[in-house]
Image (cartoon, grey):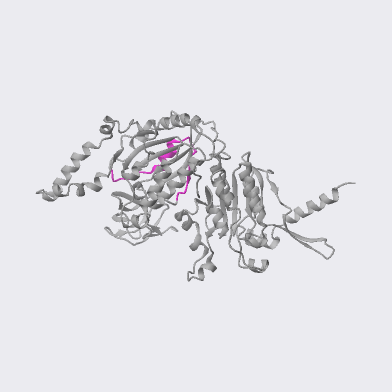
Amino acid sequence: MIYSEVSGTISEILVSHDQIVEKETDLIIIECMKMLIPVTTKNRGKIIKIYVKENDIINEGDKLIDMNYDI
Amino acid sequence: MSWEKELEEKVSREKLSENLGGKDRIKKQHDAGLYTIRERINLLTDKSSFNEVGKLAGHAIYNENNDLIDFKGSNFIFGKAKIDGRNIIVGGDDFTLRGGSADASIKEKHLKCEQMALSLQLPLIRIVEGSGGGGSVKTIETSGRANVPEVEGWNLVVESMGTIPRVALGLGSVAGLGAAHLACSHYSVMVKEKSAVFVAGPPVVEQIGQKLSKNELGGYEIQLKSGAVDDAVDTEEEAFEAAKKFLSYLPNSVYQLSDQIISKDDPKRTSEWLIEAIPKNIQSVYKIRPIIEDLVDKGSFFEMGKGYGKSIVTSFCRLNGWPIALMASDPYSYGGCWTSDTCKKVQKFVDLAETFHLPVIYLVDCPGFQVGLDAEKKGTIKEGVRAMSAIWQTTTPWLSIIIRNCFGVAGAAHKRGSSYISRFAWPSARWGSLPLEGGIEAAYRSDIENANDPKLELQKITTRLNKLRSPLRSAESFLIEEIIDPRHTRRVMCEFADLSAPLRKTGITNRTMRP
């Protein structure tokens, strides 16, 4: 599970369900304190569930994306 | 006439002491993937360097003729040892004997360990598992009365925070006084999935209606984020390496200075990529750690507290071989804004540098304090002024390099009032009381609202003001002393380290640091 490390607004979602992404891929962009902060996956995996949509206001610790790394 | 017989008995008792809590308990410890305390000390310290103190102290059982039947050592083992050829004091809990609790402890050993490190002015490494010599519920039966709570010897712990480096390794379940010892250190480490740290463990917490596993209650993800523990590693061996690395930057005590080591890295080395390290788009972030790794002596970057107060990276490093306390903003966390946790982290870090006379370098990209309801609820401004005060109270040489944002009260904390610091800026630097992006709409509200095309008016004002914020215009008024080529930053930092070395002064600081 990938959680948000900051509070802010979901600016852009760069991936979709079932997509396989390589490690270090940017998944979501969060606008926070006027900056655009990418949320990145540390490992290769498949997107299982996306918990947010664009323009959602999120808090630190909110669920963002569930990934399956056993692929 | 000889004393051989007496010596034989001593050796025999020492051997019994090495049995710890017995074969079954040792097996249980190993089955849990954990080392025993004696194995830990052997792995941590230089071969055959451990000189134990009080190996004969423990709990003996005698028969009716007063002959010894059995002997179990105390569950706290300590002594002098060497790591990397350097003297240290090490003390640790034996979890195989009553879970490290007071029932099988001799409290004087804990006190003597603290006293020894403080008096000999040597770094102390505490290996903590269990309750660290604290009481258990069963203590009332063994002692026959209830204790009025007291932490005997805590004055030594407090004094040593301002005198000698204290490292604490939490290598299993750590609770109560053990957790206090872990938290009361300059640097603490736990092992992922093996260690858990809490004031009270799951069975106690269940009594207040929280049914949680050890990891859910006090696993590394909880404690790193809370800032109670500095780092987590995968194995006990890595925890020992982390302790050694941390100590390698520090003197034995505040009465000494850290040594320069021979550096093979050219202090004048330039890095071409740094000219484009900061994105032109002011909303885009960049990774600060590769920049730090490039600037410092190769392989010397040692980060502490990565999981906490993330807007600031706090680290030790070397520049031309000199140990330096380096902090840097991380725009990936709140754009580098100082959150309440960041402020607490800064306080501890600059106190640490001041205590052990390490010059400070700060790579500044701070748009200000975090703003918003969350920030207010967490008392950001209160922690912010405490962090600022900690910086203002430092006397150690200080270099700030403004690499991007420097705004507001938090931005001003890159220096300590009007006292001299070395200061430079990159051409990407931007500063002011408030970032334009956050303030134009408010400051020019009536102009924008009264304009025929408010959007166009906002754009016009932004363009007009942006022209004024070049750092070169500030340099005209000597508001910034020098703007440097980012590619030559390492040379500037190494020169600072060379110039600072003879300025460092030994001794206890006026206000000793709290954990």
Report x, y in % for residue B372.
30, 55
**How many numbered circles does the render carry?**
0
Left or right position of B504 against B85: left
Q: Is residue B307 magenta?
A: no
The percent position of residue B223, horizontal first and vertical second, equals 48, 56
- Say above or below: B194 vs B239: below
Residue at 67%, 53% in the rendered image: B109
- Residue B483 vertical position relative to residue B238 in the rendered view, above or below: above
The residue at the far left in this view is B452
Q: Position of residue B2 (x, y in %)?
A: 88, 46
**Residue B283 forms part of the magenta stretch:** yes
When the figure is inspected, residue B135 is found, relative to residue A30, above or below; the finding is below
For this view, does B233 lie left or right of residue B47? left
Image coordinates for residue A35, horizontal then vertical, percent? 30, 48
Q: Is residue B371 visible?
A: yes
Q: Quadrant of residue B72?
A: bottom right
Name which quarter of the figure residue A7 lies in: bottom left
Q: Which stretch is magenta?
A: B282-306
Which one is nearer the viewer's eye here, B414 or B232? B414
Whether residue B238 is visible to the viewer of this picture, yes or no, is no
Residue drawn at (59%, 55%) of the image? B128
